[in-house]
Amino acid sequence: MGDVNNGYKLSKKTRLQFGSAKPSNARKSNSRSESMPESLLSSRRRSVEANEGVEPNRKHRLGGERRGKGFDEGLERKRGMSAGAGREGRGGRMGSGGVGDVKLRTRINAERRLSGKLGKMRSVGGGDDDDDVMLRTRMGDERRGKREFDERVKARREGRGGRMGSADGADDGGEGRGGRMGSVDDDGEDVRLRTRVAAGRRGKREFDERVKTEQGMSTARREGRGGRMGSVAGADDGENVRLRTRVVGKLGKSEKGFGKGGDLDKESVKGERNRRRGGALEGYANKKKDKKDEEEVENDTPKKRKRIKLDPYDVSNKRMDDGVSMDGKETEKKVEAEKKTEVSKNAQFRAIQPSPSILSFVEDNLLGRRRSIELRRAGYNVDLSAPLDNIPHSTSSEREHCEENVFRNKLTFFAAANVSSSFPPADLPEIAFAGRSNVGKSSLLNALTRQWGVVRTSDKPGLTQTINFFNLGSKMCLVDLPGYGFAYAKEEVKDAWEELVKEYVSTRVGLKRVCLLIDTKWGMKPRDHELVHLMERSQTKYQILLTKTDMVFPIDVARRAMEIEENLKANKSVVNPLMMVSSKSGAGIRSLRSVLAKISRFAKP
Ligand SMILES: Nc1nc2c(ncn2[C@@H]2O[C@H](COP(=O)(O)OP(=O)(O)OP(=O)(O)O)[C@@H](O)[C@H]2O)c(=O)[nH]1
Ligand SMILES: [Mg+2]
C-alpha cells in the first residue's frame, strides 16, 4: 500500500519536477494517502500496481526518465505546432511520454473541458484517445464554421450581395432581398425558422403598404376625388376591415368625417364595431327608443315644467328692490317716504313764481341772504347791529333816530301773566307777537324799538313762558307771547301756554293786531294754522311776519311770502300785506314800524 502511494506521488512530482523524487515529500504524501479512501484512488495507481516485482523506487525513476524524454519530445513538437498551424486552429497533438500519462492527460483535458477552456488549451502530453479526437473534431468544425461565417459577412459588407447561406446547408428559397443569417448547421429547424421570419417580414411590409395606400386614398377623398378603399390583398375580408378601422383610428377621423362622398364601407366598419361590442349597445338603444315612443303615445299632453314657488317672505331669494319688509328696515322706508314727500314739497316750493310786487319789495329792502359787500355798495354801515335799519349813505357814525315817533319811546315791561285772570287792564292799544317757540318774537321787539336787552332772548326754545306786557311810552302796549310747538318744557306746561295764548288772542279786549311770526325757512306749520283758524273764528286781526329772512336766499323769501299769501288769501281776518323782516340784519324793520305806527295812530283807546 505504501508503494502505491509512493508511485502516485512520484508520478505527480515527476511531471512537475521532471522526474526528481524527494523522500521527504514521499513520506509526507504517504502519511496523507493513508487516510484517503480506496474509492478515490485513480486508475493510475492501479497501473502502477501492475508492475510488481520491480523495485518501486527504480521503477519510478526509470519511468520518470522515460516520461521525461517523451515529454521533451512532445514539448518540442508542441512548440513547433504552436508557432505554425496550431495557432491557426488546425489542431495537432502533443506527443505522449508514456501509457500512464495518456489517461492523466485525458483526465486533465476532461477537467479543462468542463471548465470551458478547452478551445484555447493545448494538450500538454501526448496520447490520443476517443474523447480527444471527438473534441478536436468539434473544435475544428466550429473554427471552420466561424471562419466561413466571417467570410460571408465580410463579402456582404463589401456589397457583393447574395445571401448568407449556411456553411453546408441548402438554400430554402428566400426572396434574396432581405439577406439571411445562416446557421452553422442548416437543418430543418433552421429552415422553418427562416420561413417564419420571412413570412413576418412580408406581413409587415404588406401592412405598411396598405397603410400607405389608405392614407393616400384618404387624402384623395379630402381633395374630393372620392373612391373607395379597397383591400390591398384583394378580397375585403375581416382582416381588411380591422385594418381600415385601425387606419381610421390612426388618422383621428371617424368615417363620418370623410364627407358625403366618402364610401368608406361604413357597414363593414359598423359591423366590425358591433361585432366587437357584441351588439349590446345597439340593442340597448333600440329598447330605449321603443320605451320612449310608448310613453309619448300614453301621454299625449306635453309635460308641464315644474314651477318653483318662491316664498314672498323669504328674504334669501329676494332682490333688494322687491320691497320686502325686513326687520329694522320698515322705519327706514318710512323715513325714505317722508323724504320723498319733503322732496316733492320742496319741488313744489321751488316751482312757485312770486309776484312782481313781492319781488320788488324783497329787492328794495335787501331781504334774504346778502353779502356784506353788497350791503356796503347799498350805503349801509355793516359795523352796526341791524345795519339795514339805518339810514343809507348816512355820514353819522351813530344810528339815526327812528323815523316813527312812537318807536322812539322807551320800552317798559309792566306785567306778566300765565293765566287769563292775571292779564293787566287793557288801557292802551295792544299789539301782540305770537308764533312758535324760537321764531324770534322777543328779538323782534328789541329790533323794533332798537332797545336791545329789554326783552330777554335765547337760542333755546321756550324761554318766554308767560304773557309779558311792555309799554311803549303812553301810546301803545307791546305784548310778548309764549311760543307753542317744540320747546324744552313739559307737555302739560306747553299745553297750558297754548291755551293761554289762544284765550288771549281770542278774548283780549284792546288787542288791535296779532303779529303771527313764521320762520321763513320752514313756513307755516299745523299749529300755526290752528291759531289762524282760532283768530279767524274770533275775528282777531292778524298779520303774517316772515322772520329770519337773512337765513335764506331772496328768491326763497319771495316764494315763501307768495306761498303764504296764496294759502291765506281766502281768510278774512288776515291783514295784508305780509311783512318780511330780519331782526339780525334789520331788513324790513322800518316798513314794519310804519305799519304798526299807523295802528297806534288810528287806534281808539
Ligand atoms: N339770524 C337770525 N337770528 C334771529 C333772528 N331773530 C331771532 N334770532 C335768533 O333766534 C334765537 C331765538 O330768538 P328769540 O327772540 O328768543 O325767539 P322767541 O320766539 O322769543 O323764542 P321763545 O321765547 O322761546 O318763544 C335767538 O338766538 C336770536 O338771536 C333773525 O331775524 N335772524
Ligand atoms: Mg321769547
Image (cartoon, helix red, strand yellow):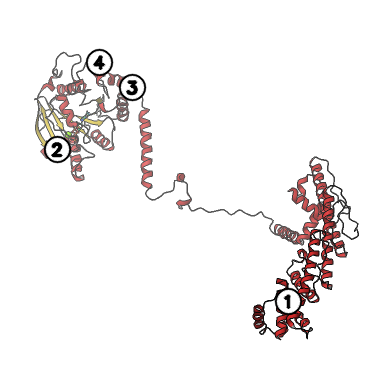
The residue mark sitting in front, 1 or 2, is 1
The type of residue carrying mark 2 is Thr
Name the amino acid, label 3. Ser
Q: Is residue 464 above or below residue 589?
A: below
Compute the Cα span from label 1 to label 3: 162 Å
- Dot placed on the residue nearer the N-terminal end, 4 or 1: 1
Q: Which mark is residue 11?
A: 1
Work out how far the residue at label 4 is from the one at label 3, CA to CA, in angstroms.
26 Å
Q: Quadrant of the C terminus?
A: top left
Instruction: Judge depth for marks 4 and 1 and give the one in front.
Output: 1
The amino acid beneath tag 4 is Arg
First along the sequence among labels 1 and 2:
1
Give the residue at mark 4. Answer: 377
At label 1, the amino acid type is: Ser
- Position above or below: 262 against 277: above
Looking at the rendered structure, the number of numbered marks drawn on it comes to 4
